[in-house]
Image (cartoon, rainbow, N blue to C red):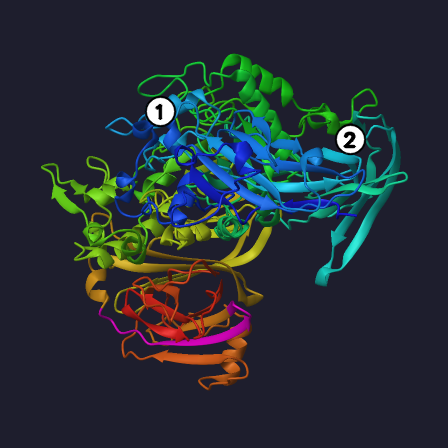
Amino acid sequence: MAQIGKTLLDSGWLAARSTEVNDDGEQLTTTNPPSLGSESPWMEAVVPGTVLGSLLKNKSIPDPFYGLENETITDIADSGRDYYTFWFSTQFQCKRLLNQYVHLNFRAINYSAEVYVNGHKIVLPKGMFRRHTLDVTDILHPENNNLLSVIVHPPDHPGTIPPQGGQGGDHEIGKDVAAQYVEGWDWICPIRDRNTGIWDEVSISVTGPVRIIDPHLVSTFFDDYERAYLHMTAELENKSTWNAECSVNIQVTAELENGVCLVEHLHTENVLIPARGNIQHTFKPLFLFKPELWWPNGMGKQNLYDVLITVVVKEFGKSDSWMQPFGFRKIESVIDTVTGGRLFKINGEPIFIRGGNWILSDGLLRLSKERYRTDIKFHADMNMNMIRCWGGGLAERPEFYHFCDVYGLLVWQEFWITGDVDGRGDPVSNPNGPLDHDLFLLCARDTVKLLRNHPSLALWVGGNEQVPPKDINEALKQDLRLHPYFTTQLLSDQDSDPSVYLDGTRVYVQGSMWDGFADGKGNFTDGPYQIQNPEDFFKDTYYKYGFNPEVGSVGMPVADTIRATMPPEGWEIPLFKKGSDGFVEEVPNRMWDYHKYIPYSKPGKVHDQILMYGVPDNLDDFCLQAQLVNYIQYRALFEGWSSQMWTKYTGVLIWKNQNPWTGLRGQFYDHLLDQTASFYGCRSAAEPIHVQLNLASNFVEVVNTTPKELSDVQIEASVWDLEGNCPYYKVLNKVSAPPKKVVKISEFKYPKSENPKPVYFLLLKLYHPSDKTVIISRNFYWLHLPGKDYTLLEPYRKKQIPLKITCNAVTVGPKYELEINVHNTSGADLPKNTLQGDGKRDGGLLEKLFSRFDVTRDSNRGLKVVEMEGSEQGVAFFLRFSVHNAEADKQDTRILPVHYSDNYFSLVPGESMSFKVSFAAPRGMKKPPRVMLRGWNYPEGFTVFG
């Protein structure tokens, strides 16, 4: 018997432009299957993927994300739809036995298609966000290859790109149910094929007579979460011509340590399904006592149970199975009466939202589990707790949601409406949204069924800066209404089981600026999107409303990324034009402009923040100074919002977290997956317990977002000047912070002291006096007096600060896990009560190794010690690790992605810190990778490993 289950069809595909193929689909899947050859129009294809992805793989087009190459690629508006109408073909084997059934599954195609299997034609209807399941049982060749060809047509209304560009081009794409960003936006260039292709998973599934369709899992809780019930409803389809007597088995397991699984629940129900029939079967709720709850990032563990449903048919055996990792959690969302912002509660606990906006992983839909894993882990590493899937992008894929479940990122999922394209843009078009409202609702309902079992999914939203047309909006409100339990907290015998609802567990909000977001009334009250004065984020006048769904700023990557994504003409830094009012305007080169660069100045409001450090000489200087600004900018943004947690704000989402192409704005990491300094500024500011300086009031504050009181802790504040001295030192004792509160501790008075230095460093540390080896929060600032700037840091670059770096490496195959300790060994004139930074406060394995082995080498332990000589004392400023391929002969030798426990850090005299660095080396690399450490005082950098 053929194995019951799913097989992916993700390799062996060929593609060809339809106008270059003389055979029809019947011939391609019978007598004339496609093949490669010098005279053949066929090429190796990327499936899942798009037409552009396949053309790029075969080097038939240049990389559209490199320099200005996208301008050389034919746009569908100029070529017509036939130019990007493509055939995709493959072969597969599937041996089935009697009473086994085979389905061909397309999880998404853009936009419409005809499928041919062994000469048989099946028409797939339109819509980018819908699944297609085709019964191919009777047309397969059980013993031979099966031929599959699919002709995919682009969206019906691909639109044209106005000369001035704009948000969503001419907005014609909004007439279809498709991603709208493909006509270009103010952060991305147009996608020339409008993402035509088989862009998501293709599979063959083999079942017995009965198959399981779209189970719905819901958890309810009672007695303060001590009692929990798992509710389940599933569609069961009988493909056979006889009544099927089934036993449906449910197994709930929890994974313990070392891969050991504990079976929490076993349950069986007998079901009779009529011949050729479908039933919706609701199971008896399963009781669990004190299940391990699922929590968002920063609130607790992301506990997941595996729920396995298996159907066994009498006189046949196992017929089908379905498995889903499931998190027991309850989410509530209301409009807060204090702030007017939308308030979220998880398992009864309020959560202060600090997250960001997400478009999609890659503009050409080159999606993968590995990329998703990195993307989502990056967000967790930044201490974010929510991602908003913007309405002009995708209904994100199950793999995206899986890693949000694993790493604890709540998800706001929007449907495919945007203000710019659907009635509020310039020019105004599509006031009634997509042409086919029934298609939109079909795609929306199918998306809900695809994603609803993920604990990370927090809410549905009708559109970005717009509500859907009235009939669609009313239908979504009805379809996504809450089950009474999720409004009353009671489960009455008169209520239907929660799992019979389409969702019923999460709120539906009609638009991103309605009902607790922005002004709540749909007025354009999100933003702003440019560089800001850091202190402004803390001011009560900065933003008027309780929850800002979009606020953005700059996003320049490092110089290596510019060189890797642009030819030398793109390495020219902006011109700085000073106006009569004293403000500077940045004039970028054409490539930066094409890649949507946001300046670091805002004439009339914000002086150029790059020039605060002096006039950069070249690309390296410019990008380094940009990273200094990035760190300050985004740390201040989150700190400013956190400063007024619950008194003025319930949350904020940054526009945006990353770019789906090589853009030069609004990003914490670039498209090559290298983090900018803003990543670590955000990471610092969004930690669950955080000590910070209010840049507007100059008060030290403690932000406690956890449900536990913080009591009897100390705050150590030390100021360091550019000579390496400590002119200000203060310890604040017996500090307490109630749960989920912000506490104003004490004014930072150094700027008001006698003869303060114009530029200085401030280090804040929060710890328990009983255990000073554990730092709860550490926050390092570089500051200047009012009316001054940071230009004194320029000569500070020449200062030679001694460092000692200890590195311990563990390798498993291509994966590297490094623990690195960096110690600033310079001395300093310190007050008597200063606790020397000898590393004891930043304890860990590496420090123990360091004290044990000092400067010796131990090859068995992989221990390496590097000393950077220097005779001057002072702060080792703005240090950054990077990992490189020692064998690479190309200009960009970086190994990406790399996960760092921290980066872009500074060390005061005598201080040490430990870091974890993890990455996978490229395949086939024989030499060890090289880990470099660079910094403001070490522009050339030096090797610390490899």
Reading the image, the residue beneath label 2 is 239
Question: Where is residue 267 drawn, in percent x and y?
Answer: 86, 41
Foreground residue among 197 and 20: 20
Reading the image, the residue beneath label 1 is 159
Q: Is residue 754 above or below residue 383?
A: below
Looking at this view, name the residue that lies furthest to the front. 31
Horizontal side, residue 508 vs residue 469: left or right: right
* Amino acid at the residue labelled 1: Gly
The local crowd at label 2, few if under 14, some if 14 to 19, many if 20 or more residues have their Cα within 10 Å, is many
| Residue 828 sits in quarter | bottom left
Helix or strand or loop: what does disc 1 sit on? loop
Question: Where is residue 407 drawn, in percent x and y?
Answer: 58, 49
- The residue segment tinted magenta is 798-817
Horizontal side, residue 904 vs residue 226: left or right: left
Mark toward the viewer: 1 or 2: 2
Q: Is residue 803 magenta?
A: yes
Foreground residue among 613 and 788: 613
Foreground residue among 590 and 413: 590
